[in-house]
Amino acid sequence: MDVIREKFSDCGKTACFGKFSDMGGLEGNYFSPEQYSFTLERKSAGKLSVVLKNIDLAAKDTLAFYEGKDVNGTPLAKLYSSQSSKVVTSSGDALTVRFTSSSLNPSEGWEATWNCGESLPSDSLKLTRNLIDENLPTGTFIGRFLINGSRFSVLNDAQSGNNLDNSDNANFRISGDSLFSSSIFNYEKKKFLSVDGSGNGFTSQEHWNSFVISVVNKNDPPVFLNQLPILQVKLGESFQYQLPTNLVTDEDGDMLSFGSKEQMD
């Protein structure tokens, strides 16, 4: 635990913006057993906010947040499992973090960014467009990211994910300040997807936000699975024919109509 004591203390002060993660770092799992706490404190009166991403905790392991300079303060949040993100905000100028692990199979942990304010500057990170038509090829340009209305230099690549609750980042690719698709989207299967982005712009301050991308429905033409036989009927004769059930399919579920063509000999 000497490494922990070197890095954290119960009353340490740091700059009013920073990052922290579990002891396994961004690439590895945390250790077990572990139990430690540290305090974030601002020099002036005000609030502190922490945004956590990629939270992955094993059963019985907890990440807890308390108001003030120690774990005797009012509990603010206690995380037990996995989720895509979490925002924790203090009402005073100090916030204490405590992590406890006892699982035999420790997980990946978390990433966190904090600053002096009610929230991290996520709302300053915008996306110029959050729509994409269905059935477009992978690599389709969706929109550009802006920080405070201006384009910027580098945006971190999207992290992996597979559903809306934990984000759909694996379906997107970020290059520079631009967002592209890395999947072909189908409106009938999924109408909305979520993607996370973070970037530093031209300053050292990190900006992060989560965006909902809407898939736009486009009419899909019917697909004929089989061909109708050529049927000939003399003019004036009655005629009945039942269409086979496996003749055609329409992904949109639209009603289909058929007609006959009169041909004179």
Image (cartoon, grey):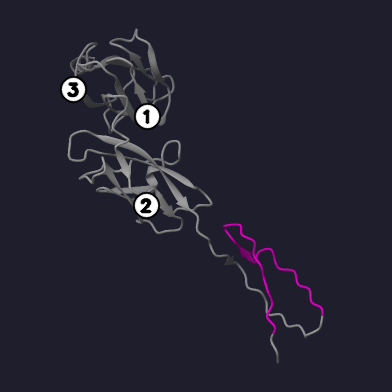
**Residue 109 appears in view:** no
Q: Is residue 243 above or below residue 206?
A: below
Can you tell which of label 1 and label 2 is closer to the viewer?
2
Q: Residue 100 sits in which quadrant? A: top left
In magenta, the rendered stretch is 238-262
Q: Disc 1 designates what residue? A: 55
Q: Residue at x 30, y 9 (%)?
A: 70
Q: Residue at x 46, y 45 (%)?
A: 192
Left or right side of 16 for 122: right
Sequence order check: which comes first, mark 3 or mark 1?
3
Magenta span: predominant SS is loop
Residue 245 forms part of the magenta stretch: yes
199 or 163, nearer to the observer? 199
* Amino acid of disc 3: Ala
Q: Residue at x 62, y 65 (%)?
A: 248
**Residue 252 appears in view:** yes
